[in-house]
Image (spheres, grey):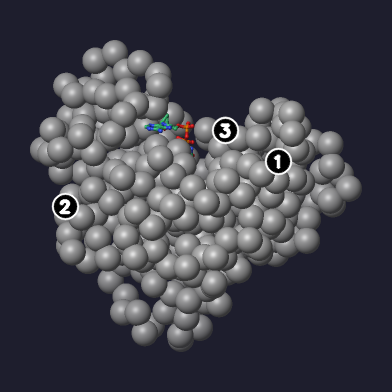
């Protein structure tokens, strides 16, 4: 039996994870947590809000599936890594913000860090069993979101209801907006850097509008391996929870009998500046990625509340990044301070309601 603690159990990833756990006799849900929604007996131990590491201490799980949204997932990520408990990570924001601190905790804990983000699960699978020197570069794909192909002037007036319609994935509101701005690909670029240890110039982002190709790895001999499948998060969730077994899921594999056309295109960095801003924050390192994430969280929340126009999300992040010091965090307190400072700067730039 593998004992699973599910954090963010009421969300999009959380609900799909419950389905995977229920469908697999060797997975057992021992603890579940949400931010505010009730959990009615979903697991023997449940917690709504509060310090999630207390729940993890009590539950002593074999695997933590961190599907909390945002920087709020940080303590659970660090707890699992520090304690050598397998971390199935959907909460990319914690790895982006904590970066080196998270990797140091993983080094001490000596546990597994298994990505649940579909692109990173795909890269992980393409890399399995290869030596680092064989790898040339990574390519993570994105659908391009609902506004792919539009220019800036066509995005001036788009509101939350348009941004919340995603062409290929059905996800929570924060990541859906991040997909519309391409901030999600930016976070994923930084996530890939920390997960796989490649410098940013060897990680490429490319758009593949139907989300059938999740990632590619290019090798030094000219060969590339790609990971294909229908866009369904139950596949990477199941992969991480049952690793290395790769258990069966209800998701069908690709049907090629009707043909399959795959198109790729480069992202439009001028219309969607958050991807370039994330790359720059990643390259500048220190707490720049933490500040990128913090400012983006503040701006997305303001956009969803109708207080900030769509294009204002990138402006808020850009202005915040221009002002932070970005010094590396020596410890978690430093990181919390960098996150708070970036949030204050981002909020200062919001239009007064
Ligand atoms: P969601 O909004 O649907 O769910 C978020 C969950 O987190 C909810 O259960 C909520 O109660 C909980 N939560 C929020 N704030 C919390 C707090 N302060 N403390 C404890 N719990 C809190 O979000 P989602 O779409 O399921 O995404 C979750 C994470 O997975 C995000 O980091 C997202 O980027 C990542 N992710 C999601 C998808 C997807 O398909 N939804 C794909 C890849 C990665
Ligand atoms: Mg993803």
Q: Is 33 rendered above or below residue 79?
A: above
Viewer-proximal residue among 130 and 297: 297
Q: Is mark 1 within 8 Å of ligand 1?
A: no
- What's the distance in space between the residues labelled 1 and 3, CA to CA? 20 Å
**How many numbered discs, if any?**
3
Q: Is mark 3 within 8 Å of ligand 1?
A: yes
Front of the two marks 1 and 2: 1
Residue 314 as seen in the image, left or right of residue 8: right
Answer yes or no: is residue 144 visible: no
Tell me the residue that label 2 is attached to: 83
- Estimate how packed mark 2 is, as few (under 14), some (14 to 19) or many (20 or more) residues with alpha carbons within 10 Å: some
Q: Residue at x 54, y 72 (%)?
A: 284
- Estimate how packed mark 1 is, as few (under 14), some (14 to 19) or many (20 or more) residues with alpha carbons within 10 Å: some
- What's the distance in space between the residues labelled 3 and 2, CA to CA? 31 Å
Q: Which mark is drawn over residue 350? A: 1
Q: Which mark is drawn over residue 173? A: 3
Answer yes or no: is residue 231 visible: yes
Q: Is 251 rendered above or below residue 318?
A: above
Between discs 1 and 3, the one toward the N terminus = 3
- Tell me, yes or no, whether the two marked residues, 3 and 2, touch with CB atoms within 8 Å: no
- What's the distance in space between the residues labelled 1 and 2, CA to CA? 39 Å
Looking at the rendered structure, the secondary structure element under dot 2 is: helix
Between discs 3 and 2, the one toward the N terminus = 2
């Amino acid at each position: 039996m593998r004992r699973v603690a599910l954090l963010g159990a009421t969300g999009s990833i959380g609900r799909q994870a419950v389905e995977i756990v229920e469908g697999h006799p060797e997975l057992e849900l021992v603890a579940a947590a949400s931010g505010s929604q009730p959990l009615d007996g979903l697991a023997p131990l449940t917690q709504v809000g509060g310090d999630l590491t207390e729940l993890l201490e009590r539950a002593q799980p074999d695997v933590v599936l961190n599907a909390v949204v945002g920087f709020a997932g940080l303590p659970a990520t660090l707890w699992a890594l520090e304690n050598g408990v397998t971390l199935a990570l959907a909460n990319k924001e914690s790895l982006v913000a904590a970066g080196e601190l998270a990797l140091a905790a993983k080094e001490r804990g000596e546990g597994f860090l298994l990505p649940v983000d579909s692109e990173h699960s795909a890269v992980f699978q393409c890399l399995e069993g290869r030596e680092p020197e064989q790898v040339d570069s990574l390519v993570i794909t994105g659908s391009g979101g609902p506004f792919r192909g539009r220019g800036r002037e066509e995005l001036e007036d788009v509101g939350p209801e348009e941004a919340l319609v995603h062409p290929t994935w059905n996800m929570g509101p924060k990541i859906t907006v991040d997909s519309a701005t391409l901030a999600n690909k930016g976070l994923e670029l930084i996530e890939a850097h920390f997960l796989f240890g490649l410098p940013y110039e060897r990680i490429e982002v490319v758009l593949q509008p139907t989300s059938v190709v999740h990632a590619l790895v290019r090798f030094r001999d000219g060969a590339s391996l790609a990971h294909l499948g229908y866009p369904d998060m139950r596949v990477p969730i199941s992969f991480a929870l049952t690793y290395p077994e790769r258990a069966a899921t209800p998701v069908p594999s690709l049907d090629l009998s009707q043909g399959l056309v795959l198109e790729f295109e480069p992202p439009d960095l001028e219309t969607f500046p958050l991807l370039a801003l994330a790359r720059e924050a990643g390259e500048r390192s220190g707490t720049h990625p933490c500040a990128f994430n913090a400012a983006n969280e503040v701006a997305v929340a303001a956009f969803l509340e109708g207080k900030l126009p769509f294009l204002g999300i990138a402006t808020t992040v850009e202005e915040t990044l221009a002002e932070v010091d970005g010094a590396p965090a020596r410890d978690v307190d430093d990181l919390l301070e960098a996150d708070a400072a970036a949030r204050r700067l981002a909020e200062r730039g919001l239009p007064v309601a």
